[in-house]
Image: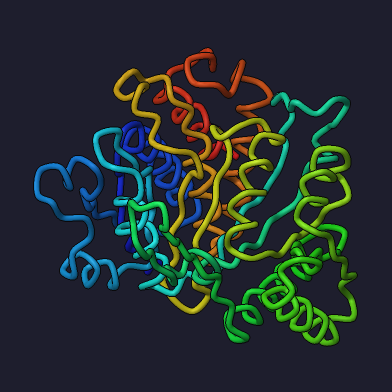
Amino acid sequence: MSKAYNIALIPGDGTGPEALAEGVKVLEAVSGKHGFQFTFETFNIGGEHYKKTGETLTDEVMNALSGFDAIYLGAIGHPDVKPGILEKDILLKLRFHFDQYINLRPVKLYAGVETPLKDKRPEDIDFVVVRENTEGLYAGAGGVLKKGTPDEVAVQESINTRKGVERCIRYAFEYCRQRSGKKTLTLCGKTNVLTYAFDLWERAFYEVAVEYPDIKTDYAHVDAICMWMVKNPEWFDVIVTDNMFGDIITDLAAMIQGGMGIAAGANINPEGISMFEPIGGSAPKYTGKNIINPIAAISAGQILLDTIGEHEAALDVEKGVTTALRDDIKDVAAGKMGHGTDAVGDIIAGYVAGA
């Protein structure tokens, strides 16, 4: 009997459903080739659902999601919903509830994709950011006093626990060991100013490093990371950092790899349910026009495959994406690909099935 995986689909808002549909198309193509099966169930949560019902993510839906092997997300974000509501009550709630303490962001420049960095080639931009995903400034600690007055005080605290920091760092070391890269792990922090939080990060980093003598370690302040990511991205193999810094540097990384249209990520609980998504937004102005680039969603499906252990299938998806970007797609920007969203999915699914 073939393996079977149950995947929860959250198409979300804007162009999310269009992009996710192409990711599903490619997953179905590769599963047929490799002899396993997917069963998909759709959960229509997001901005439109919130506008109609006032609900974001109910306990009933959370309980249902607990029964799946993975969550595959399109995009969350609606122009008619105040910023912060959907992000906090859907995205962060999912990450925290399922303890998805790793945000994994592969950063790779593919042949045929332009980067704004002068003279940089695909071999120069190929690294991974491991971001702590459930603590830091995103933990929600803090508050406001005297709101709306001249004496208003707003406090947002960064929460860093030894458990949370160490498990993220250990995951990064393991990932670096398994990856066919330079076997170099760089800690990104700000030890000269954020002396409490990053003293913890630095101590944990070097204490865990003793267990990984095959991995070279390095440290850089977050501002230096941004500088070197632009000037010398080839220096990096795997970067590990906290929640806020990881959020910032991965958007910079997306630009140097060619843009949000091809940037995929994952929210991972190595012992539980993980969630896979394109890192870009819902791009509502392109909704229904069949022009959004679905490759970020397709690549998120590739990370899903790798995470559930279907490594050969994941390699086939990456080969399909690589070939399509090199030979078929004119530009990764929406409306400039030379093909519609659905056609791009068809092209990659065709390569995957024949890989």
Counting from the top left corner in percent of width and height, residue 32 is at 43, 49
Q: Which residue is most to the left?
A: 53
Which quadrant of the figure contains the C terminus? top right
Q: In this view, does 265 lie above or below 153?
A: above
Q: Residue 288 is drawn in which quadrant?
A: top left
- At x 55%, y 69%, the residue is 136
Counting from the top left corner in percent of width and height, residue 60 is at 15, 68
Q: In the image shown, does 13 or 195 lie closer to the viewer?
A: 195
Counting from the top left corner in percent of width and height, residue 109 is at 73, 36
- Tell whether 154 sits left or right of 242: left
Q: In the image shown, does 156 or 330 lie closer to the viewer?
A: 156
Q: State how the image is colored.
A: rainbow
- Tell whether 9 sits left or right of 261: left
Q: Residue 95 is drawn in which quadrant?
A: bottom left
- At x 78%, y 70%, the residue is 177
Q: In this view, does 268 lie above or below 334?
A: below
Q: In this view, does 81 lie above or below 88?
A: above
Q: Is residue 315 above or below residue 159?
A: above
Q: Residue 275 is drawn in which quadrant?
A: bottom left
Which quadrant of the figure contains the N terminus? bottom left
Counting from the top left corner in percent of width and height, residue 97 is at 36, 73
Q: In the image shown, does 106 or 186 lie closer to the viewer?
A: 186
Regarding residue 295, the answer to whether it shows in the image is yes
